[in-house]
Image (cartoon, helix red, strand yellow):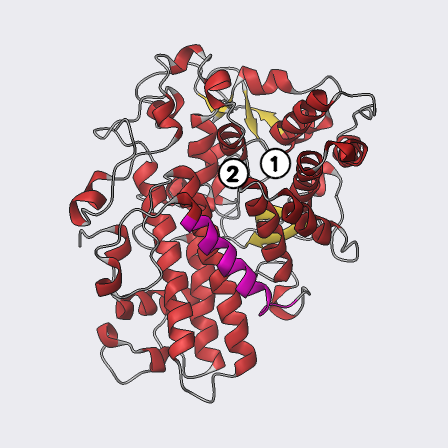
């Protein structure tokens, strides 16, 4: 059914999809499958938990429409690697040495996305809006539910986790596309004529969702969240720190990052080879992938895709001599042209096992980013905090085996050092590099100087709104240049 991404499915089908994702079978209900009502899905904690499980399952395992093949899910689903892989090609992290037109990411790599060749942009748009709508279904259903068997305590948990997922989805949508509709309902009548919202309005909704979620969620990792595979208050705090950094509210960015770092009973930096393991205390939130896919088994969807994507010479040359992140987090590409791929996760296409043990899950947020957010926010809120900024950078550098930066750095050298540490620590991870270049106004200077991105055009710092979305919802406007 071809509709706009925010009109893809009605509430009944959407809720049934969440239930299917959560338990692989429908609940025993009397009404037809295409008329599931809010009261039927949200009549008890148990039934709401199945729908909540479905929300998470979609983020990492997708649904029936997310990928043409199991092994490409990490490219096709925004929250399972799609953001990482597409944005890393649009930036200066990934490329193919041959730069041939048959390369899957040719248009992202060479700055040649057009309305006739959209690359992976449509898949990111659709899967991210599916994440929004799945969250909306839980939010709307929970707020409308009347059953006494759906307890106030569990309602808060469902609301908090769903609000945080919606905020996450909106965050990537506004950074990748900017001109997005602010869809807050699953009702077609509410969403069919939505215009493009301003980025400020989207960010305010993200903040509102996260602030509300914070009041509902536990501060602990307990029960079925000991593996940190469910959102709790600390993911919300970390996301707020990131969002406030992006919106230039440096005081609040510092406060939220500092709060996360301060919970040393929960979080600590791990040795490089332990960062992405299931028991890592550096993890704030991670997604647990299905391990029964024949073509990728226990590998994370992202790493399966990344393990035959080449890191650019620009990135590899940016590592300082002696930086252990280069040896721990990259590996030679097997066969083909010489080069290296990102190997933060150790299970990849060369060693995965069908139904094998998952020694690592897919990390969505981790502590190292909070040190980098606190460092940048500290410096930008007041340059007098330079020494504290350098202390945070040195904490990250020591873990990588590098010498400390001196306090004698100038203000500009300190700002440059922040950018360098973010580039190396967060490479090939959730689009950080591309979004950092854009938000710091460095994208044209750096990306515009790359030979294979010529002729350079800054309009491709935003992906195009899929044309069919504009045709079906003509209040949306296309990004400039497309």
Overall secondary structure of the magenta stretch? helix
The answer to which image quadrant residue 317 occupies is top right
Report x, y in % for residue 27.
36, 78
> Dot 2 corresponds to which residue?
303
Instruction: Determine whether 475 is above or below 15 in the image.
Output: above
Query: Furthest-top residue in view?
Result: 451
- Crowding at mark 2 (Cα within 10 Å: few <14, some 14-19, many 20+): many
* Number of numbered labels in the structure image: 2
Q: Which quarter of the figure is the N terminus placed in?
A: bottom left
Q: Residue at x 46, y 89 (%)?
A: 148
From the viewer's perspective, is 119 left or right of 1?
A: right
From the viewer's perspective, is 104 left or right of 273?
A: left
User: Mark 2 touching mark 1, by CB under 8 A?
Assistant: yes
From the viewer's perspective, is 432 left or right of 359?
A: left
Q: Residue at x 25, y 74 (%)?
A: 33
- The secondary structure type at the circle numbered 1 is loop
Report x, y in % for residue 170.
42, 50
Q: Residue 228 has which mark? A: none
Q: Which quarter of the figure is the C terminus placed in?
A: top left
> Dot 1 corresponds to which residue?
344
Report x, y in % for residue 198.
37, 45
- The secondary structure type at the circle numbered 2 is helix
Could one spot residue 277 in this view of the protein?
A: no
Range of magenta residues: 201-218
């Amino acid at each position: 059914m071809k509709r706009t991404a925010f009109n893809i499915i009605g509430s009944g089908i959407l809720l049934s999809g969440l239930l299917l994702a959560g338990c692989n079978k429908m609940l025993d209900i009397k009404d037809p499958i295409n008329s599931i009502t809010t009261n039927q899905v949200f009549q008890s904690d148990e039934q709401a938990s199945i729908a909540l499980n479905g929300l998470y399952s979609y983020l990492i395992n997708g649904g029936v429409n997310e990928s043409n093949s199991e092994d490409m899910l990490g490219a096709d689903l925004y929250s399972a690697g799609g953001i990482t892989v597409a944005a890393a090609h649009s930036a200066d992290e990934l490329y193919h040495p041959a730069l041939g037109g048959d390369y899957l990411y040719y248009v992202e790599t060479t700055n040649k996305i057009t309305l006739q060749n959209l690359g992976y942009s449509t898949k990111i748009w659709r899967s991210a809006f599916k994440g929004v709508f799945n969250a909306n279904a839980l939010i709307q259903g929970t707020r409308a539910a009347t059953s006494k068997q759906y307890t106030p305590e569990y309602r808060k948990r469902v609301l908090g986790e769903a609000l945080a997922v919606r905020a996450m989805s909106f965050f990537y949508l506004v950074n990748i596309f900017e001109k997005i509709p602010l869809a807050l309902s699953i009702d077609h009548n509410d969403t069919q004529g939505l215009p493009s919202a301003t980025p400020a309005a989207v960010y305010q909704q993200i903040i509102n969702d996260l602030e509300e979620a914070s009041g509902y969620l536990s501060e602990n990792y307990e029960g079925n969240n000991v593996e940190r595979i469910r959102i709790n208050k600390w993911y919300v705090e970390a996301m707020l720190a990131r969002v406030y950094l992006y919106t230039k509210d440096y005081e609040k960015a510092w406060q939220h990052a500092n709060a996360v770092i301060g919970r040393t009973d929960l979080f600590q930096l791990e040795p490089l080879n332990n960062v992405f393991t299931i028991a890592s205390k550096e993890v704030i939130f991670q997604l647990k992938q299905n391990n029964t896919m024949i073509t990728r088994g226990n590998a994370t969807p992202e790493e399966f895709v990344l393990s035959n994507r080449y890191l650019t010479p620009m990135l590899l040359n940016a590592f300082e001599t002696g930086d252990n992140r280069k040896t721990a987090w990259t590996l030679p590409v097997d066969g083909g042209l010489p080069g290296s791929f990102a190997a933060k996760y150790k299970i990849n296409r060369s060693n995965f096992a069908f139904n094998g043990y998952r020694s690592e899950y897919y990390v969505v947020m981790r502590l190292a980013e909070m040190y980098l957010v606190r460092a940048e926010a500290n410096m930008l809120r007041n340059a007098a905090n330079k020494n504290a900024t350098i202390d945070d950078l040195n904490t990250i550098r020591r873990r990588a085996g590098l010498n400390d930066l001196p306090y004698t750095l100038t203000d500009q050298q300190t700002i440059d050092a922040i950018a360098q540490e973010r580039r190396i620590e967060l490479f090939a991870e959730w689009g950080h590099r591309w979004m950092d270049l854009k938000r710091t106004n460095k994208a044209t200077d750096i990306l515009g100087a790359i030979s294979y991105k010529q002729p350079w055009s800054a309009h491709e710092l935003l992906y195009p709104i899929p044309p069919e979305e504009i045709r079906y919802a003509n209040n949306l406007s296309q990004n400039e240049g497309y």
